[in-house]
Amino acid sequence: KNQVEQSPQSLIILEGKNCTLQCNYTVSPFSNLRWYKQDTGRGPVSLTIMTFSENTKSNGRYTATLDADTKQSSLHITASQLSDSASYICVVSGNNNDMRFGAGTRLTVKP
Amino acid sequence: NAGVTQTPKFRVLKTGQSMTLLCAQDMNHEYMYWYRQDPGMGLRLIHYSVGEGTTAKGEVPDGYNVSRLKKQNFLLGLESAAPSQTSVYFCASRPTVLGNQPQHFGDGTRLSIL
């Protein structure tokens, strides 16, 4: 079983709407959790990183949350744009810098 | 600043053929990684390097070899390609593992083995 599970697998929303992507993990001990955005045909690009002591962090219209007790993270996208169409990947690192990748959520924003 | 460059971008091979994928980074990063990405699965680490002249096995190393003769280059070799190696291969680099530095990824090599 993958140590990083993301949901939903895919999501379709209308432009301007908000959405929330989920990431549950079992990686332990925990060091940090990072969200990447991967456009079609491109490599992943880091959006934000959450460490153990952080609950919420924003990067423009992207807001990540972390609950280290329940081992859950979410990525909330506000006022979606067509350019937000991409895969969003959750990556969890343990104390030995071993990184575990989720399978990603494929987001499609339609006009 | 090109970042991480992968060549080639696409390749079709026949079973049993060999090839080398090249990754080059111009950011003077110490750490470099090779991943494969398959549908429905997260990126899986094939091999990695913590510095020039060093390599180490990742999660799925079988059927692949790597070399890091120069700090800026990390080569991934397939000695005898198999259909199970059809995948998208990503290279990444990172300055260090300290300070929560992110990985920088190339745009991938799409490899099909017939």
Image (cartoon, rainbow, N blue to C red):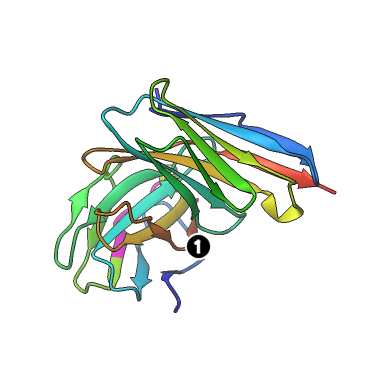
Write down the region rendered in magenta.
B75-82
Residue at 67 percent of width and 42 percent of height: A107
Give residue A92's quadrant in the image: top left
Picture layout, residue B33 above or below residue A97: below
- Which of the pair B88/B42 is nearer the observer? B42
Residue A77 in picture, x, y percent from top left = 65, 43
- The quadrant of the rendering that contains the N terminus of chain B is bottom left
Furthest residue toward right: A111
Whether residue B112 is visible: no
Residue at 69 percent of width and 49 percent of height: A85
Residue A60 in picture, x, y percent from top left = 61, 53
Furthest residue toward bottom: B1
Whether residue A21 is visible: yes
Residue at 18 percent of width and 64 percent of height: B51
What is the chain identity of the residue bearing mark 1?
A: B
Residue B98 in picture, x, y percent from top left = 24, 54
- Which of the pair A57/A13 is nearer the observer? A57
| Residue type, numbered disc 1 | Asp
